[in-house]
Image (cartoon, grey):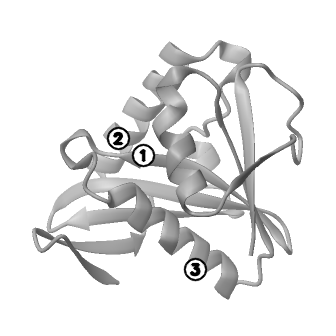
């Protein structure tokens, strides 16, 4: 799927097999940042093997041959999915990449019959832009879901589809 954004880029979204060097590097950067920002017990980002689980659909967004970002959904049950591994490449920050990926994940969830999308993100200042992104697209703060429990380092959000 190709999308034009701000006349400068033509983004292409693709269901990814997580085998490319660019995506492996971006995911490692993501994990490194999560571990640098949050205590170990509060890092809920999936590693590469976790993202390859059959319950996960992993999407990448490209500007030609340049990786602009990624995002995934993990199916929790027939009607509930979790957003995982949202990340924008440094060169593409503040250019609509995260919104484009998020809107795609929401549409994919609706198409597959999901009625509720949930996510966990950090509570520290580092995560304030993420909170704004999700609020902008209709997510609301909620309590823990699935196997999560209350954690002062986590915020939980959901969107009823």
Look at 60% across and 53% down and name the residue there.
135
Up the image or down, 13 lies above or below 138; here it is below
Instruction: Evaluate whether residue 16 shows in this view.
Output: no
Callout 2–callout 1 Cβ contact below 8 Å: yes
Residue 149, by quadrant, is top right
Q: Tag 3, which secondary structure? A: helix
Position in image of residue 21 (x %, y %): 28, 47
Q: The C terminus appears in which quarter of the rendering?
A: bottom right
Callout 3–callout 1 Cβ contact below 8 Å: no
Mark 3 or mark 1: whose residue is earlier in sequence: 1
Residue ID for mark 1: 87
Up the image or down, 95 lies above or below 142; here it is below
Position in image of residue 61 (x %, y %): 33, 64
Question: Spatial distance from mark 3 to mark 1, Cα to Cα?
Answer: 18 Å
Residue ID for mark 3: 107
Question: Spatial distance from mark 2 to mark 1, Cα to Cα?
Answer: 8 Å
Residue depth check, mark 2 versus mark 1: number of the one nearer the observer: 1
Direction from residue 109 to residue 151 in the image, left or right: right
Residue ID for mark 2: 26
Residue depth check, mark 3 versus mark 2: number of the one nearer the observer: 3
Residue 32, by quadrant, is top left
| Residue, far left | 8
Instruction: Evaluate whether residue 94 shows in this view.
Output: yes
Mark 3 or mark 2: whose residue is earlier in sequence: 2
Q: Tag 2, which secondary structure? A: helix
Look at 52% across and 17% down and name the residue there.
37
* Mark 1 closeness class: few <14, some 14–19, many ≥20 residues within 10 Å: many
Mark 2 or mark 1: whose residue is earlier in sequence: 2
């Amino acid at each position: 799927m190709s999308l034009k954004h701000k006349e400068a880029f033509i983004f292409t979204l693709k269901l990814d097999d997580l085998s490319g060097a660019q995506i492996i590097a971006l995911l490692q950067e993501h994990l490194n940042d999560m571990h640098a920002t949050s205590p170990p017990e509060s890092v809920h980002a999936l590693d590469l093997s976790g993202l390859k689980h059959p319950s996960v659909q992993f999407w990448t967004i490209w500007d030609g041959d340049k990786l602009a970002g990624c995002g995934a959904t993990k199916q929790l049950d027939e009607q509930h999915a979790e957003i995982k591994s949202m990340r924008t490449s440094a060169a593409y920050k503040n250019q609509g990449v995260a919104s484009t990926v998020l809107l795609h994940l929401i549409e994919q969830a609706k198409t597959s019959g999901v009625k509720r999308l949930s996510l966990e993100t950090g509570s520290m200042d580092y995560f304030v832009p993420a909170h704004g992104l999700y609020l902008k697209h209709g997510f609301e703060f909620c309590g823990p879901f699935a196997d999560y429990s209350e954690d002062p380092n986590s915020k939980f959000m959901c969107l009823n589809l």
